[in-house]
Image: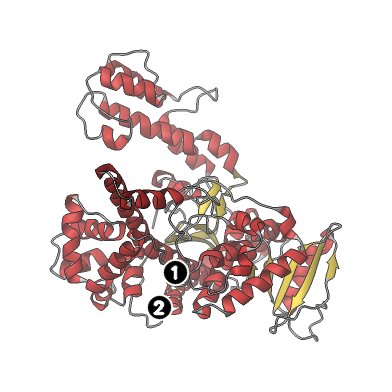
């Protein structure tokens, strides 16, 4: 395969490991015909990819972006597009849009490698939320022959799908997200260690000399808790022992969770809640975390694109998805650089309005806070109630204040509420639901099937029926939110991909004003530095800040048009340009 610009452009380039070491690559034309493999020595990989990227900018096809791209970024090579076979297999294997997925199911190695971390093959119930683990990997899938075979299967699956355009867009967005995840780690989040230490010292007291020693403010809170409980020896960090001490002090609790503790009145409760908050800060983002995850002025977390069944990202290290607000002042741009921060106001309700084509709900959020717009509609009295009702509608609340308010939303926005109600009904029957672009929910686990079967058998007890109803409702709540959260994740991927594409076109700043810690690719260019579901931060040279802010806004509009077409839903951004992430 030649990289000579006089040759025909390469549409796809499949890259894999060679049997005897090094790499192999093969071009694939639009017709699906593959060329002759080219052997690439490990030392020549970056040059090969860089040359072909400049001449043809193909869509790179590889088993896993995380296994190849970090090495290229270190060498100063950025690629524009890729097709991540593992992530795409995960989508295609389960998507209801795929009519003929048979060949995708024949190799159990791909099924294992592509399983989301929170839904192991043959494993437990799916989760909607973030976890910290990494998917399994099989190095035998890295070969060129395996990658080429899998790519052929995936192309056939898309071409035969009921809606190939949507599915192809989802695969492109998912793969773009994998590139962004690798680039986020390579560039890192600009981090002020002195400010982080100041915050820790202010909250916890000075750093103790030993790793097992407690800071003075945490230790002091513990002394107050023990005094209030009348037990000077209680091990507060041991939930079973703490639970016994709480009960002995007359506090009738079933657990030591902060939510349950907050419902009780006792002199020990407030200091105990303080202790738990300080202990969480120390364990999750204390000095040990700072030493491990921040170096050269950069925090470099490890993201897992598609790590949650809805398509949301997870993290396998560094806790990027759980950075507390109080540490935001530690996110500090380099000298003569700025942070452009943006988060989407009420992303999931806006996505729901777009999916359902609910014009009344779209109008409620156009150019303004959606919850305030719902209040203005006259159906709900306060913004707090509007937010509570919307969350109840998307997460399936049937009782309490949220459950009381949801029927009002049904009257105000029947199309939007009908969409999530229908998704819940499908889940309760054991069916699967699908996001806007084609990611489908996993089928019910065997335990769910067994509970439903037991309730329908002759002689079923009332307990069997209650278990079946409860599990059906639980699954309905899962599918109700799956379609919304999953589609919101798709919109966010499109937003990220568009921002990334536009930032790459900026002119680099002079070398003397670069940010070397951001790496060879990004030290002179504005670049994405942080992502959290509906929030991004771009690290940019000061002179590009206004243009970057415009890019972020325009990219949100472009993502809405790409997914939903008519642009009737306004994806409103809270946009800030500052030196630190928490300041305007």
**In the image, residue 342 lies at what x, y percent?**
42, 63
The residue that mark 2 highlights is 564
* Local crowd size for mark 1, using a 10 Å CA cut-off: few (<14), some (14–19), many (≥20): many
Quarter of the image where the C terminus is located: bottom left
The answer to whether residue 7 is above or below residue 54 is: below
The answer to whether residue 54 is above or below residue 196 is: below
Badge 1 marks a residue whose secondary structure is helix
**Mark 1 or 2, nearer chain start:** 1
**Depth check: 469 or 196 in front?**
469
At horizontal 60% and vertical 71% (from top left) the residue drawn is 504
Quarter of the image where the N terminus is located: bottom right
Give left or right: position of 344 versus 384: right
Asked if labels 2 and 1 touch by Cβ distance under 8 angstroms, the answer is no
**Depth check: 63 or 321 in front?**
63
Badge 2 marks a residue whose secondary structure is helix
Q: Tell me if residue 505 can be seen.
A: no
* Local crowd size for mark 2, using a 10 Å CA cut-off: few (<14), some (14–19), many (≥20): some
Give left or right: position of 215 versus 53: left
Q: Quadrant of residue 91?
A: bottom right
At horizontal 28% and vertical 22% (from top left) the residue drawn is 246
Give left or right: position of 258 versus 121: left
At horizontal 30% and vertical 65% (from top left) the residue drawn is 420
Q: CA distance from mark 1 to mark 2?
A: 9 Å
**In the image, residue 363 lies at what x, y percent?**
25, 76
Q: Tell me if residue 250 can be seen.
A: yes
The residue that mark 1 highlights is 491
**In the image, residue 203 lies at what x, y percent?**
39, 33
**Depth check: 3 or 23 in front?**
23
Q: Quadrant of residue 273?
A: top left
**In the image, residue 567 lies at what x, y percent?**
37, 80
At horizontal 77% and vertical 66% (from top left) the residue drawn is 145
């Amino acid at each position: 395969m030649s990289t000579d610009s006089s040759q025909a452009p390469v549409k796809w380039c499949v890259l894999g490991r060679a049997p005897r070491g090094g790499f192999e690559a093969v071009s694939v034309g639009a017709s699906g015909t593959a060329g002759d493999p080219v052997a690439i020595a490990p030392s020549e990989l970056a040059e090969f990819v860089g040359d072909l990227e400049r001449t043809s900018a193909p869509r790179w096809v590889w088993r896993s972006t995380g296994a190849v791209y970090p090495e290229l970024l270190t060498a100063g090579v950025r690629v524009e597009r890729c097709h991540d076979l593992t992530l795409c297999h995960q989508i295609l294997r389960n998507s209801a849009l795929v009519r003929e997925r048979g060949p995708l199911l024949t190799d159990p190695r791909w099924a294992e490698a592509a399983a989301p971390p929170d839904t192991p093959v043959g494993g437990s119930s799916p989760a909607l939320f973030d976890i910290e683990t990494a998917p399994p990997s099989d190095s035998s899938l890295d070969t060129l022959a395996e990658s080429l075979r899998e790519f052929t299967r995936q192309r056939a699956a898309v071409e035969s799908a009921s809606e190939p355009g949507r599915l192809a867009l989802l695969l492109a967005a998912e793969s773009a997200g994998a590139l962004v995840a690798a680039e986020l780690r390579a560039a890192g989040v600009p981090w002020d260690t002195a400010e982080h230490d100041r915050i820790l010292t202010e909250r916890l007291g000075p750093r103790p000399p030993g790793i097992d020693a407690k800071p003075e403010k945490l230790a002091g809170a513990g002394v107050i808790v023990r005094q209030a409980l009348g037990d000077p020896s209680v091990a507060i960090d041991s939930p079973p022992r703490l639970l016994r001490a709480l009960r002995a002090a007359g506090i009738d609790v079933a657990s030591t969770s902060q939510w349950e503790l907050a419902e009780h009145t006792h002199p020990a409760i407030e200091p105990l809640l303080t202790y738990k908050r300080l202990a969480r800060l120390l364990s999750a983002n204390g000095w040990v975390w700072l030493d491990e995850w921040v170096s050269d002025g950069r925090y470099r977390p490890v993201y897992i694109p598609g790590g949650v069944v809805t398509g949301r990202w997870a993290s396998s290290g560094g806790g990027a998805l759980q950075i507390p607000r109080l540490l935001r002042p530690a996110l500090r741009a380099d000298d003569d650089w700025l942070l452009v921060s943006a988060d989407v106001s009420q992303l999931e309700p806006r996505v729901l309005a777009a999916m359902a084509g609910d014009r009344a709900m779209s109008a409620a959020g156009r150019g303004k806070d959606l919850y305030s717009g719902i209040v203005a509609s006259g159906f709900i009295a306060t913004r707090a109630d509007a937010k509570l009702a919307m969350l109840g509608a998307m997460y399936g609340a049937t009782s309490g204040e949220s459950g009381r308010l949801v029927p009002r939303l049904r009257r105000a926005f029947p199309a939007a509420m009908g969409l999530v109600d229908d998704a819940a009904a499908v889940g309760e029957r054991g069916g699967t639901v699908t996001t806007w672009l084609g990611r489908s929910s996993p089928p019910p686990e065997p335990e769910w099937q067994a509970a439903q079967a037991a309730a329908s058998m002759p002689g079923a007890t009332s307990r069997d029926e209650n278990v079946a109803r409860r599990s059906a409702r639980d699954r309905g709540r899962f599918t109700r939110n799956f379609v919304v959260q999953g589609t919101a994740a798709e919109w966010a991927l499109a937003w990220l991909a568009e921002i990334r594409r536009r930032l790459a076109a900026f002119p680099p700043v002079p070398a003397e004003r670069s940010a070397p810690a951001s790496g060879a690719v990004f030290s002179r260019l504005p670049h994405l530095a942080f992502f959290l579901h509906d929030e991004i931060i771009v690290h940019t040279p000061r002179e590009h800040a206004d243009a970057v802010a415009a890019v972020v806004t325009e990219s949100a509009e472009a993502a809405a048009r790409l997914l939903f077409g008519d642009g009737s839903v306004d994806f409103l951004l809270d946009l800030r340009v500052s030196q630190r992430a928490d300041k305007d």
